[in-house]
Image (cartoon, rainbow, N blue to C red):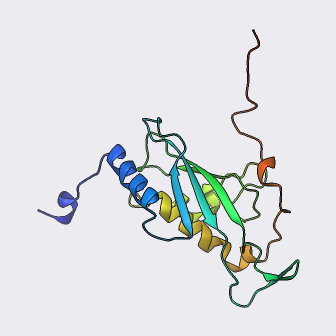
Amino acid sequence: MSSEEAKVVVPRNFRLLEELERGEKGIGDGTVSYGMDDADDIYMQSWTGTILGPHNIDGVFFVVMNGYQTAYEGKIFQLKLFCGKEYPESPPTVRFQTRINMACVNPETGVVEPSLFPMLANWRREYTMEDILIKLKKEMMTSHNRKLAQPPEGTEEARPDPKGPAKCCVM
């Protein structure tokens, strides 16, 4: 049997259950985390990710009140990941909830643009949501991103919901 024939393709739900277990147990990189938005989501599509901003890098410092930090240090970035029915064959949609200034992120919507983020553009089935979060954190440390001024604190909740405003009925 060749190595191509020996590969076992893990079904989508089993793959997502593996990722959920890793996320819940905190296995792996302790500076990123992820989990399901809704435990009742039987399709396991909607996830939340968190990235802890990287510390001082390569001697690049940014003046912040009472000290020196990188543009991302000390910040917590919240993301939404949406795994469509084609996941893991196709990448999830990734969107920052927290306002952030990065070359690969649309500043209006917070969406990580696949054409500007090679991991999504060259997606492979083996990649995971944790891999995406770790790669985004590494992207924060690249020379073209670490120098970018970040939105002021307190603008985290200012990003509009792409689904539109909540609708309600009055009886």
Q: Is residue 69 above or below residue 72?
A: below
Residue 50: percent from left, percent from top:
60, 60
Say whether residue 123 is visible.
Answer: no
Please give the count of numbered marks on the rendered protein.
0
Q: Quadrant of the C terminus?
A: top right
Task: Please provide percent x and percent y for residue 109.
Answer: 74, 48
Q: Position of residue 166 (x, y in %)?
A: 73, 29
Residue 135 located left or right of residue 76: left
Q: Furthest residue to the bottom?
A: 59
Relative to 95, 170 lies left or right = right
Identify the residue at image location x=46%, y=49%: 90
Please, is residue 153 above or below residue 138 in the view?
A: above
Side of 87 relative to 73 (left or right) = left
Q: Is residue 59 left or right of residue 39?
A: right
Residue 103 is drawn in which quadrant? Answer: bottom right
* The furthest residue to the top: 171
Identify the residue shown where x is 47% and y is 40%. Answer: 39
Q: Residue at x 49, y 45 (%)?
A: 83
Q: Nearer the viewer, residue 20 or 116?
A: 20
Q: Which is more toward the observer, 127 or 32?
A: 32
Please state which of residues 71 and 8 is positioned toward the viewer in this rendering: 71
The answer to whether residue 56 shows anywhere in this view is yes
Q: Residue furthest left?
A: 1
Q: Determine which quarter of the picture holds residue 124.
A: bottom left
Percent from the top left, x then y, of residue 125? 39, 56
Q: Which residue occupies 18% across, 58% down?
A: 5
Which quadrant is home to the N terminus?
Answer: bottom left
